[in-house]
Amino acid sequence: MLNLVLFGPPGAGKGTQSEKLIDKYQLVHLSTGDLLRSQIAAQTELGLRAKALMDQGVLVPDEVVIGMIDSKLRENQAAAGFIFDGFPRTVRQAEALDDLLSQYNEQITVMVALEVDQEELTKRLLLRGQSSGRPDDQNEELIRRRVSEYNEKTTPVAGYYQQQGKYVGINGIGDIEDIFQTISNEIEKRHS
Ligand code: ADP
């Protein structure tokens, strides 16, 4: 199995690169942001609770996202692999993911981190907000809050994978196809 963690701040291009990687490697896409937004759309109790936090730009509790990932792994046991997008966002989530995968004798193959500076991120998110309708992309204050949550709680996740020798940093500014090629090369070094 190819199990890829796609890492990077909001607006780094995880969604764009995910789509291309899914096509190329036939992976199941697990985006906790998308899973949470579908709970909101379905107006479930979990969705209502998550919305209150997402509207403030802060993370939802670890147990909530870990539970969602657990059930998706269970539902997709025949998959060629997974792409984890927007997850794990805390070290606790990263540890839980390792535990979940080990139940299937699986592990993370590589973590690919897209690196993009703050100024470019804000520009991209505001632009996305004009068409996506995502409320958290339409307000500069909220964007700053999400990036600071990322810096504080999510950056340590890179260190977690670095310790396992699984971290690869990639420049997320430039041509989409070039970035995709670089990611593909890194994957193929580790997965045959
Ligand atoms: P982005 O990376 O552009 O901020 P996402 O769609 O990944 O967008 O996430 C949107 C919001 O959903 C986050 O700001 C957070 O509130 C919540 N969220 C998504 N994934 C997680 C996660 N793994 N842990 C906690 N909260 C999450």
Image (tube, rainbow, N blue to C red):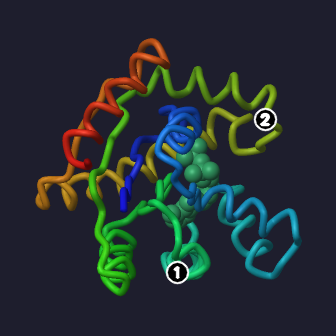
Horizontal side of residue 171 vs 76, given as left or right? left
Foreground tag (1 vs 2): 1
| Image position, residue 1 (x, y; %) | 36, 62
The amino acid type found where label 2 is placed reads Ser
Instruction: Report the number of numbered marks.
Output: 2
| Residue at the spot of label 2 | 132
Which badge, 1 or 2, comes first in the chain's sequence? 1
Picture quadrant of residue 125: top right
Q: Residue at x 44, y 46 (%)?
A: 148
SS type, badge 2: helix
**Which residue is at the far bottom?**
103
Disc 1 and disc 2: Cα gap in Å? 28 Å
Classed neighbour count for the residue bearing mark 1: other residues with Cα under 10 Å, few (<14), some (14–19), many (≥20): some
Picture quadrant of residue 52: bottom right
The amino acid type found where label 1 is placed reads Asp
Q: Residue at x 31, y 68 (%)?
A: 91
Would you say residue 58 is visible in this rendering? no
| Image position, residue 60 (x, y; %) | 58, 69
Classed neighbour count for the residue bearing mark 2: other residues with Cα under 10 Å, few (<14), some (14–19), many (≥20): few
The vertical placement of 159 against 116, above or below, is: below
In terms of depth relative to the viewer, which is nearer, 174 or 51?
Answer: 174
Q: Residue 70: give its label.
A: 1
Horizontal side of residue 175 vs 129, given as left or right? left
The vertical placement of 24 against 119, above or below, is: below
The vertical placement of 62 against 130, above or below, is: below
**Which residue is at the far top?**
175
| Image position, residue 33 (x, y; %) | 63, 56
Would you say residue 166 is visible in this rendering? yes
In terms of depth relative to the viewer, which is nearer, 84 or 157?
Answer: 84
| Image position, residue 107 (x, y; %) | 29, 69
